[in-house]
Image (cartoon, coloured by chain):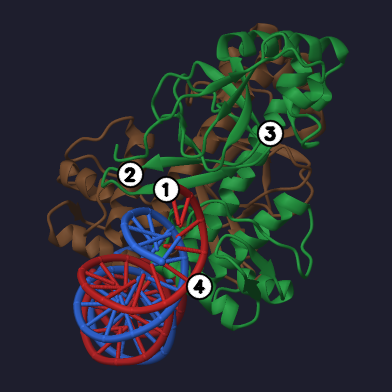
Chain colours: A brown, B green, C blue, D red
Amino acid sequence: MAGRATRAVRLIDATAPEILRCIGCDVRDLTFCSCLDAGGLRDLHALVTRIAADAGTTLAEEGAPLADVFNLTSGMAMTFKALPDGRRQVTGFVLPGDFLGLAGTDVWADSVEAVTDVQLCRYPEAAFARFLANHPEAEHRLLGIARSLLAAAQDHRLLLGRKSAAARVSWFLLHLARRYHGRIEVGDVVPLPMGRHDIADYLGLTVETVSRAFTKLRKAGSITMTAPSAPVLAAPERLIALAEDDEG
Amino acid sequence: MAGRATRAVRLIDATAPEILRCIGCDVRDLTFCSCLDAGGLRDLHALVTRIAADAGTTLAEEGAPLADVFNLTSGMAMTFKALPDGRRQVTGFVLPGDFLGLAGTDVWADSVEAVTDVQLCRYPEAAFARFLANHPEAEHRLLGIARSLLAAAQDHRLLLGRKSAAARVSWFLLHLARRYHGRIEVGDVVPLPMGRHDIADYLGLTVETVSRAFTKLRKAGSITMTAPSAPVLAAPERLIALAEDDEG
DNA sequence: CGGCATTTTGAAAGCTGTCAAACCCTGTGG
DNA sequence: CCACAGGGTTTGACAGCTTTCAAAATGCCG
């Protein structure tokens, strides 16, 4: 309600020949189209519209009719649910290769907002559903994606249930680092383009508590920070211990 | 590790003609086999073994190879993850009609324990996968089930993130009542065969806090209780308000 | 009826949330 | 290039709620 203004979404010409890139397949191996043959890719490409949006843009609103399915190809977005009392629960951060709108319902399960400037592929939902019907292998892969989303939600739930603030932030950093780099190593930078408020709403904490947790990790030497948006993993093993235990 | 002893699982003869009942379709409309034709039901029935287990039995262990898929037909079970420090996060309670083992991974994502004496249908995982390959409509339905599980996990996550103890318990009671009776009405009994400890681990609280929350609801007249395991919805509207807000 | 586990209650400590203010960084305008 | 305004981040103090530790009460089962 009191969210940021929704800026216009710009279209990008969709004539580029790099079908895979457009569909996001070369961004991440996990995307569902890696199971498609050339014909399937052609069919899918026929549906796509490439889109760009500025940071802060609302890409979808919780409860709104789901007309399109998206695939993020660059930048970062986040999904969240609004709570009755005006607060929100951020349910996830969306990285290149991730899909949006696969909830299977006819309305959006979460609102989606661009964290940074983003580029994405848009597929009309109805056409996408027809495509799935014609390509069982794609639907099968989609089932796998839905399952891993479920696993992620469960992990997240585990975190929200019984962890201290420092444990949550440690887990968050490690989780993001793994998604960014596929590894956890000393000196790795973990870019945090989202604000502290977004992190707080993701971890079920307040901005202040998140900030204190970062300070605590910094003073303990577990991380270093030149800017609030670019912490460096200084002692990953300590972060891991913290994330698994729960005392800070 | 320090769990209850795993009692033997008994087999029940699977020759009964009521295929639907055996597969759990008449227990709940939501199960995936309601999309099957007679041939599909026959194929599915050919795979099934009926099983019974006593309360407290461990039906599956987190991380163990997933050899079978289950469908609960009577009683109650619960799924949970063990935390490194010995505590656990109960991830869900399993009611008749619900499936177990659909995580899509080759190992169990959660441990499963019978809360009451239970009866269930067992399908060998490999055969079940072949069955799905031969029945795309079933796999399609399965995708829907996975999606609703995801939605449930997200709701749960929302709850764990930012709710007071009384709000969580209220939500829990309403949620269970809806699953039991499909409605919320004054005077409805909500059986709680699980212990307070299980509820606490589900809601991300301690036993004591859960108990205090029940007492609070009772003293406020929102519920009445003849036994700890059988609360009655005395003022559902108050419970609903409590579950949505978060002050108690 | 007695024993045992579960549930409930009590008191104190710890952590997070709330309210408020200082600090830092960024981008703008002179 | 520097000063300034603004938002986001960090820090501080205190209240509230949950956890923890301990003990009493209740309910269940033999």
Q: Which residue is mark 2?
A: B83
Q: Chain of mark 3?
A: B
Residue B213, disc: 4
Separation of disc 2 and disc 1 at Cα? 7 Å
Look at the picture and state if B150 lies above or below B230. Answer: above
Q: Which residue is mark 3?
A: B145
Specify the amino acid type for callout 3. Answer: Ile
User: Counting residues from the N terminus, which is met first, the one under dot 1 or under dot 4?
Assistant: 1
Specify the amino acid type for callout 2. Answer: Leu
Quadrant showing the N terminus of chain B = top left
At horizontal 71% and vertical 14% (from top left) the residue drawn is A136
Labels 3 and 4 positioned on one and the same chain: yes
Q: Closest to the observer: B83 or A66?
A: B83
Q: Position of residue B154 (x, y in %)?
A: 57, 49
At horizontal 72% and vertical 37% (from top left) the residue drawn is A104
Label 1 sits on a secondary structure element that is strand
Q: Closest to the observer: B17 or A71?
A: B17
Asked if the residues shown at circle 2 and circle 3 are in contact, with their CB atoms under 8 angstroms apart, the answer is: no
Look at the picture and state if B185 lies above or below B139. Answer: below
Separation of disc 3 and disc 4 at Cα? 32 Å
User: Counting residues from the N terminus, which is met first, the one under dot 1 or under dot 3?
Assistant: 1
Q: Nearer the viewer, mark 4 or mark 2?
A: 4
The answer to whether any part of residue B53 appears in the image is yes
Q: Chain of mark 4?
A: B
Q: Which residue is mark 1?
A: B89
Labels 2 and 1 positioned on one and the same chain: yes
Residue B96 placement: quadrant: top right
